[in-house]
Amino acid sequence: MDTAEEADICRVCRSEGTPDKPLYHPCVCTGSIKFIHQECLVQWLKHSRKEYCELCKHRFAFTPSNISQLMSEAY
Ligand SMILES: [Zn+2]
Ligand SMILES: [Zn+2]
């Protein structure tokens, strides 16, 4: 599945970052699962109802108010 390119990709949707949807590194995971789109992270947070990474247990580096705002906009 992997190509020769080692571009940074989102761990959720496997897409690269774009100017519209830049990749974030909100926790301390490393390697191929390091990056995630803010949009994908918000979706994940909505489903998991967690504010921390279940892999590294690091609390995501988004402010709660920012997350609630994004979540309320999504609803
Ligand atoms: Zn994504
Ligand atoms: Zn993590």
Image (tube, rainbow, N blue to C red):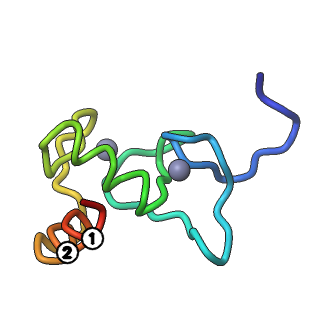
Q: In this view, which residue lies farthest toward the right?
A: 4
Relative image position of residue 42 (x, y in whole percent): 31, 56
Name the quadrant containing residue 22.
bottom right
Residue lying at 14% horizontally and 68% vertically, measured from the top left: 68
Asked if labels 1 and 2 touch by Cβ distance under 8 angstroms, the answer is yes
Could you say whether the residue bearing mark 2 is in a helix, strand or loop? helix
Relative image position of residue 24 (x, y in whole percent): 46, 64
Indicate left or right for 28 with 46 as reference: right
- Ligand 2 positioned in quadrant: top left
Q: Quadrant of the N terminus?
A: top right
Could you say whether the residue bearing mark 1 is in a helix, strand or loop? helix
Residue 73 is labelled as 1
The Cα atoms of the two marked residues, 2 and 1, are separated by: 6 Å
**Crowdedness of circle 1 by 10 Å Cα count: few (<14), some, many (20+)?**
few
Indicate left or right for 62 with 25 as reference: left
Relative image position of residue 39 (x, y in whole percent): 42, 60
Residue 59 is labelled as none
Q: Please, what is the three-letter code of the amino acid marked with disc 2?
A: Gln
Residue lying at 61% horizontally and 75% vertically, measured from the top left: 20
Residue lying at 33% horizontally and 49% vertically, measured from the top left: 43
Residue lying at 24% horizontally and 60% vertically, measured from the top left: 75
Q: Please, what is the three-letter code of the amino acid marked with disc 1?
A: Glu
Dot 2 corresponds to which residue? 69
